[in-house]
Amino acid sequence: MYYLVYGFFYLLSLLPLKILYFISDIGYVLVYYIFKYRRNIVDANLLQAFPEKTPAARKDIAKKYYHNLLDSFVETIKSFSVGKNFYSRHCLADYSIFDRYYQEGKSCQMHPAHQFNWEWYNHHFAIHMKQPSLAVYIPMTNPLFDKLFYRQRTKHGSIMLPGVNMKESFSPWKNKIHVLTLVADQKPGDPYKAYWFNFFNKPTPFIKGPEKAAREKGCPVVFAFCKKIKRGYYSAEFIPVTEDASQLPEAELTRIYIKALTERIKENPDMWLWSHNRWKHEWKPEYGELRQ
């Protein structure tokens, strides 16, 4: 079954992007208008984040978001067959900060967000960084698709570390130069083990893992955010935050990240993953301090 499904996606990936985007447009109509996939979550999240905007303005963001979501899906399919040069044509980034860390013999952490198209940049990082590119991921519940996308995501050199046993999977890399990518806007599974900050007008939990790992290693941290230049073309922005995360007070790195993330979302609101139920948990005093 695995090879049958892989063969289907591979053959589909051979279609020109123009045709894949036509499929995306059809998918948008089905997902947004017919099936209304997570429309209630998207609408509620946008109302939470942008109460000052008119309903028409929020609806416009939602429509653009669903277009980006479907585009990301077909772009991921395209990844099954394209080579390294494809990503150099479609993704832009200045890797000089990572080159410097490589020359200095320093490992570092990169904290991106759920912005489109993270799948393409996973390959772009691995292709253009001089040091190994490590990324933490959550295995899919379906073993077939987990194997399928693991193969796709690692084909150009990305090293995927399963988050379910992070300590064990990272162990071989502790004393080797690397860039470790930890998506920092994940919703924590346990609200008691989170930093709580006001994020878009509401108390919101953020996972402690990315900051904790950086502070323990005393390593540099770089934030990464994406912009869409036009359909099928993206640019990445790398923001050096600290040369030694252990020198920052606890929760300060997360605070800085949230401020930067908020600014980028406001600049390009349709690029963030609004169908994610980000405000599922309501803050309670027993969860811990609500930071500002």
Image (cartoon, grey):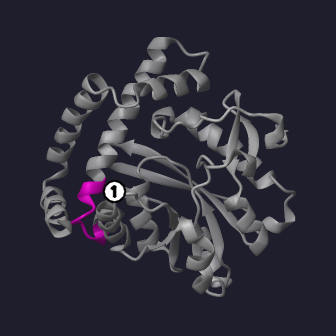
- Residue identified by numbered label 1: 90
Q: Is residue 81 magenta?
A: yes
Res 283 seen here: yes
Q: 43 or 85, which is in the foreground? A: 43
Q: 125 or 1, which is in the foreground? A: 1
**Residue 6 falls left or right of residue 203:** left
Q: How many circles with numbers are drawn on the protein?
A: 1
Q: Is residue 176 magenta?
A: no
What residue is at 84 percent from the left and 60 percent from the top? Answer: 248
Q: Quadrant of the C terminus?
A: top right
- Residue 54 spot, x, y in % from top left: 52, 12
The range drawn in magenta is: 76-85
Q: Secondary structure at mark 1?
A: helix
What residue is at 30 percent from the left and 55 percent from the top? Answer: 76
- Considering only vertical position in the picture, is 112 above or below 132? above
- Residue 100 spot, x, y in % from top left: 63, 76
